[in-house]
Amino acid sequence: MTSIRNSIIALALLYFLFGILLAVGSVQLPERVASHFGFSGEANGWMSRQVYLVFMAFFGMIFPMIAPLAGLLIGRLPMSVINLPNKEYWLAPERREGTTAFLVSQLLRLAVLELGLVIVLHQLVVEANRQQPPRMSNMVWAVLAVFLVFMAGWIWSLVRHFRLPEEKAF
C-alpha cells in the first residue's frame, strides 16, 4: 500500500504543478497558439489560447486517470472479461485482492508517467510559441524516446510479475 500512497502523492504534486504551468501558460501564450507541429518542427495546426488551455486542462486531467480507474474495476469484473497472463492463477479468490492492488499501484505509476509527458509537452508548446514563427524544439523527440523507454520498462515489469511462480509452472 505504500507504493499506492507514494504514487498518489506524486500524482497530486504533478497535478498541482500542471495547474500552475497552465496558469503561467495562459499569460505566456499568444492569442493564436501553434498547437500541432510537423516532423521538422514547423507549426501546422492552430487553436485559440482559450481552446488550447481548456483542451490541455481536460486532456491533462483525464488521460492519466483512465488506466488507474480501469484498474479499480479489476476487482469487480468477471474473470472472462479480464485479459491478464495466467489469469486463472492471479485472479483466484485468494490472490485477486493482491493482484488488484498490484495493478492499481502499477497503473498509478503509469498515470504519473503520462502526466509527466503531458506537462513536458505543454511546456514545449509554450516554448515553441515564444519563437517567431512558432517552431517545436527537436527536444520533443528525446522526450518521446525517454517516455517509450520508460513504457517498455513498465510493460516488462508487468510481464515479469504475471509469470507463474516457479512452483506453479508446468
Image (cartoon, helix red, strand yellow):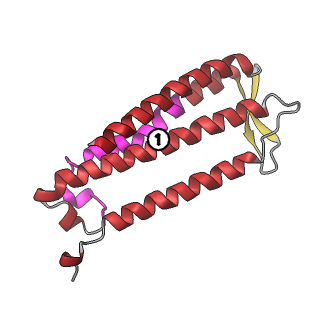
- Residues in magenta, as a range: 58-84
Residue 30: say if magenta: no
Q: Residue furthest right?
A: 132
Q: How many marks?
A: 1
In the image shown, does 126 or 7 lie closer to the viewer? Answer: 7
- The residue located at (80%, 39%) in the rendering is 43
- At label 1, the amino acid type is Val
Residue 6 x, y percent position in the rendering: 37, 38
Q: Is mark 1 on a helix, strand or loop?
A: helix
Residue 72 among magenta residues: yes
Taking the spot 82% from the left edge, 50% from the top edge, the residue there is 40
Horizontal placement of 76 versus 70: left or right? Answer: left
Q: Furthest residue to the top?
A: 27
Residue labelled with disc 1:
112
82 over 38 or under it: above or below: below
Where does the image place residue 8, in percent across and percent down from the top left?
A: 37, 35
Image position of 153 with respect to 38: above or below: below
Q: Residue at (69%, 21%) from the top-left corner?
A: 49
